[in-house]
Image (tube, coloured by chain):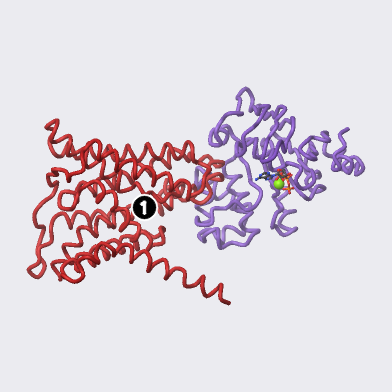
Chain colours: A red, B purple
Amino acid sequence: MLQGALAGLAAGGLYAVLAVCLTLMSRLVRVVNFAQAATGMVGSYLAVWLVVHTGLPEWAATLGGILLGAGLSAGLGWIVCTWLAETDTGTRSAVTAAVLLLLISLSFILFGNKPQPFRPVLAGPAFQVGGVVVSQVTVATVGLAVLVALACRLLLGRTAVGVRLRALSERPTTAELLGIPAKPLSIAVWAGTGLVATLAISVVAPSQSNDPTSLAMLVVPASAAALLGGFRRLDLAVGGGLVLGVVEGAVAQSDHLSLVRYFLPLLFIVALLLWSQRKEVWDAAR
Amino acid sequence: MNTLRVNGVTVARGAGPVIRDVSLELVPGRITALVGPNGAGKTSLLEAISGVLPIASGSVHIGPHDLTRQSRVGRFRRGLAHIEQGRAVFGGLTVLENLRLTARTGEQVDQVLALFPELAKRADSPAALLSGGEQQMVVLARAFAANPAFLLIDEMSLGLAPVVFTRLLPVVSRFAAEGAAILLVEQFTHLALGIAQDAVVVSSGRVTHQGPAPDLLASPATLHTAYLGESR
Ligand SMILES: Nc1ncnc2c1ncn2[C@@H]1O[C@H](COP(=O)(O)OP(=O)(O)OP(=O)(O)O)[C@@H](O)[C@H]1O
Ligand SMILES: [Mg+2]
């Protein structure tokens, strides 16, 4: 059980990183980015393609993939900022859902439908607790999640750019009237989350089921984790991701329950939605 | 000294034009009162000048610079500030954070806080927790801190206690005296005309009267006909 739970922590770290990205996107540019994991998937696939077809060293290929992920996300952000600046969150999010499908089909066309011959960026154990091995991948993803969440907290709370981003997210028109450049700042947020998501996926993909659909659909458990923080709180998003990964890992150990793991994120989402609705029901019943 | 010139501006909104062929000029050091009945198009005109709404025809210039197709940020950088109708504070930001969006130095922050002593006490609380009047003060202070050459003010009195409002009017006057050009939209017509040099009356999207503010203040009959939309 403990072995399973710790094995799940690597996935949990990935969920947490993606959940932080989703939370930032929702807070700062008012989009639920369904294509968050898919952009990372395409970036990490490019890295594999570069290694196989150009013989580029692994680190350089990975870097190239990460930059592509950031660029892809920035491009999508540019489109949304240019043509959908005045639309509501629903419309903007629907566009990212379309991009998700587009990226999945595109990667089938470009890279085929088989898992990619990933070579691990990180491999091997980092340390042992009570005889159970914790892998380097686990340490890297969990560390990245915590680091990104802390860095964003500092950025948003303590820096002039962070305050501008918060102003922009609250009242975009008023912010622009005060000279805050909405478009460059928003595109920077898209690029930043694209970069971080691709980095995390590149680290974890070699040790996971890494066909295009599995990777792109990481957005589902990530959304579940982000939902725990109401798509606003970074700490809860990180916690949610880690807990979800650990529970999945533990459940996978049991023969009876192992099928349940695939439905865990959905169960998590439904439970959170019901929980968050309880007050409304009370109010309506008054 | 540059002036801001609005030239034959028409603004369309929803069903059709809400501002038709309006021209006016804002001159440094002078306050222009823009008055008219509810729905006349005052807010729409201000929004067209600052870039919130697109201009269907006509132009807006600051000196030789054509702002008509410029972004909101571009217009701000040319020295234009717009205090929107309603209390446009950033509720999630503290009072200080709101002010620092436009103030360049700590000194500038202190200067505007000196104009609004009520705010100094609340400097670190989120603006959302302030009263309506205090929020309106934050919005004013934030605009003053940008030190704009051209200031558009839409309903400054909204939510302010009359004593606070009458205390603020001289602050606006002083700001103009220091060289700013101000376009003041106000429901309290007489108070606005009282501190303004120029007056523009709009009704149903058209200018129905334009002239010195003191003259209009002295002639209630003229004001009345202009409100009813009879151009003269
Ligand atoms: N969002 C909108 N969509 C369509 N039409 C609008 C919109 N907002 C205002 N209007 C119309 O534009 C016209 C001018 O409105 P505007 O808000 O500019 O008037 P105003 O002079 O500022 O009024 P008030 O004194 O009540 O603030 C009105 O007839 C109004 O019905
Ligand atoms: Mg108005």
Q: Which of the 4 image quarters holds residue B20?
A: top right
| Nearest the eye: B58 or B156 | B58
Residue matched to label 1: A22
Q: Residues within 10 Å of mark 1 (few under 14, many from 20)?
A: many
Q: Which of the 4 image quarters holds residue B161?
A: bottom right
> Three-letter amino acid code at disc 1?
Leu
Q: In the rendered view of the protein, which quadrant contains the C terminus of chain B?
A: top right
| Nearest the eye: A69 or B151 | A69
Image coordinates of residue B115 in percent, x first then y, are 63, 52
Residue B192's place in the image compared with A272, above or below, is above
**Does B2 sit left or right of A190 as displayed?**
right
Chain under numbered label 1: A
Image coordinates of residue A65 in percent, x first then y, are 23, 39
Q: What residue sits 58% from the left and 48% below the top?
A: B142
Q: In the rendered view of the protein, which quadrant contains the N terminus of chain B?
A: top right
**Does A174 sit left or right of A39 as displayed?**
right
Q: What residue sits 60% from the left and 36% below the top?
A: B51
Image coordinates of residue A36 in percent, x first then y, are 33, 48
